[in-house]
């Protein structure tokens, strides 16, 4: 299918305002680096998501699903396909007693804030995570001893055929930075979290404490994708990188943070190639010095 036909089809399904051509992906990732996507579509209903997935499959069109782009780097060569962004147009958050149901495009921080306002405890750890509910569920996002698998009740998704399915937390096959979403190429549409009644003042106090700790220890003033590497069993990635003497090590505009060695940051003008090269350098040096393989947490497209 040629590009003009793809464009027409995307507009027919999602609406002209929701389709962009040759979109610069640095606008859609927290690294603020990378190439262009041939098409970017931002559907405003779950039905349109399903219809788009069916269209991709029937016409064998290369596609990739993103949320807030907080764990993603698009190579400088770009992506010659369709990026489907589930973002602010699919971000409704609904509270029902001690449960919160959030669409995949809702930010985890917004959802945690809604929990606090509703006097619901258990989601405080997520208040500073920069990702969306969909991306967070897909990779079982966590921080400060909490993980989404601790509070998820059910997840509603669509499969590669555009058919909707709902799975319980036990069926999600959650483990460290992993879920069934990755194995089956499911697309998260929404998730329901089960929380407990709490005092809003105490919930806010915990959120403020965690967010202050984050500000103190993490280089939030620079674009990054959060922790660059997964935690290797028995080690901490940041400590290995620091002990390897790599704090401040840079390639072009990409740099190992002086504040937290587990973060690769964009100090200004970094290309995706700079960041990818730096990731490779860090992996090689840590492997040579300590015999430990660092696995990137960042997805490279």
Image: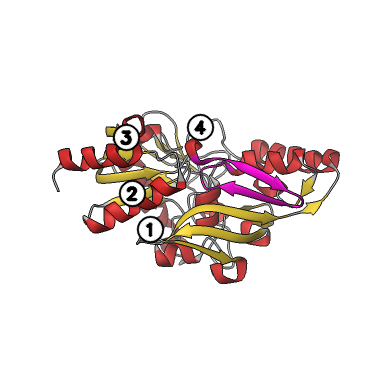
Q: What stretch is highlighted in magenta?
A: 90-107
Q: Is mark 1 on a helix, strand or loop?
A: loop
Local crowd size for mark 4, using a 10 Å CA cut-off: few (<14), some (14–19), many (≥20):
some
For marks 1 and 4, the one nearer the N-term is: 1
Mark number, residue 52: 2
As helix, strand or loop, the secondary structure at mark 4 comes to loop
Dot 1 corresponds to which residue?
162
Circle number at residue 19: 3
Residue tagged by mark 4?
222
Q: Earlier in the sequence, mark 2 or mark 4?
A: 2
Tell me the SS state at disc 3. strand
In space, the residues marked 4 and 3 are separated at their CA atoms by: 29 Å
- Mark 2 → mark 4, Cα distance in angstroms: 34 Å
Instruction: Please report the residue visible at 63 percent of the width from the left and 55 percent of the height from the top.
Output: 192
Q: Distance between the residues labelled 1 and 4?
A: 37 Å
Kindly report the distance in space between the C-alpha atoms of the residues bearing marks 2 and 1: 8 Å
Instruction: Give coordinates of residue 49: x percent, y percent.
Output: 40, 48
Residue 127, image x, y percentages: 66, 42
* Residue 211: % across, % down: 69, 39
Quick check: 6 left or right of 98? left
Q: Earlier in the sequence, mark 3 or mark 1?
A: 3
- The answer to whether the residues at label 2 and label 4 have Cβ atoms under 8 Å apart is no
Which residue lies most toward the left here? Answer: 2
Task: Check contact, mark 3 vs mark 1: CB within 8 A.
Answer: no
Q: Residue 15 in the image: x percent, y percent?
A: 33, 34
């Amino acid at each position: 299918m040629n590009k003009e036909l793809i464009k027409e089809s995307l507009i027919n399904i999602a609406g002209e305002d929701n389709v962009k051509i040759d979109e610069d992906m640095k606008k859609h990732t927290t690294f603020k680096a990378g190439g262009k996507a041939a098409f970017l579509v931002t559907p405003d209903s779950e039905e349109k998501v399903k219809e788009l997935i069916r269209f991709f499959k029937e016409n064998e069109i290369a596609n990739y699903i993103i949320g807030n782009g907080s764990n993603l780097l698009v190579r400088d060569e770009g992506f010659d396909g369709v990026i489907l962004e589930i973002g602010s147009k699919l971000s409704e958050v609904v509270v029902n007693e001690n449960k919160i149901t959030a669409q995949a495009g809702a930010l985890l921080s917004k959802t945690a804030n809604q929990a606090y306002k509703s006097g619901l405890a258990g989601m405080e750890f997520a208040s500073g995570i920069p990702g969306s509910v969909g991306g967070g569920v897909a990779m079982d996002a966590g921080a400060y001893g909490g993980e989404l698998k601790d509070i998820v009740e059910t997840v509603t998704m669509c499969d590669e055929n555009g058919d909707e399915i709902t799975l319980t937390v036990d069926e999600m096959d959650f483990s460290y930075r992993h879920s069934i979403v990755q194995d089956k190429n499911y697309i998260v549409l929404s998730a329901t979290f089960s929380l407990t009644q709490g005092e809003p003042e105490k919930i806010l106090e915990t959120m403020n404490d965690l967010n202050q700790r984050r500000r103190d220890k993490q280089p939030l003033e620079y674009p990054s994708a959060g922790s660059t590497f997964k935690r290797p069993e028995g080690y901490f990635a940041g400590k290995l990188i620091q002990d390897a003497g790599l704090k401040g090590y840079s390639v072009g505009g990409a740099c190992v943070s002086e504040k937290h060695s587990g973060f690769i940051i964009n100090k200004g003008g970094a290309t995706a190639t700079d960041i990818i090269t730096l990731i490779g350098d860090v992996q090689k040096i840590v492997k040579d010095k300590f015999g430990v393989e660092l696995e990137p947490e960042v997805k490279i497209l």
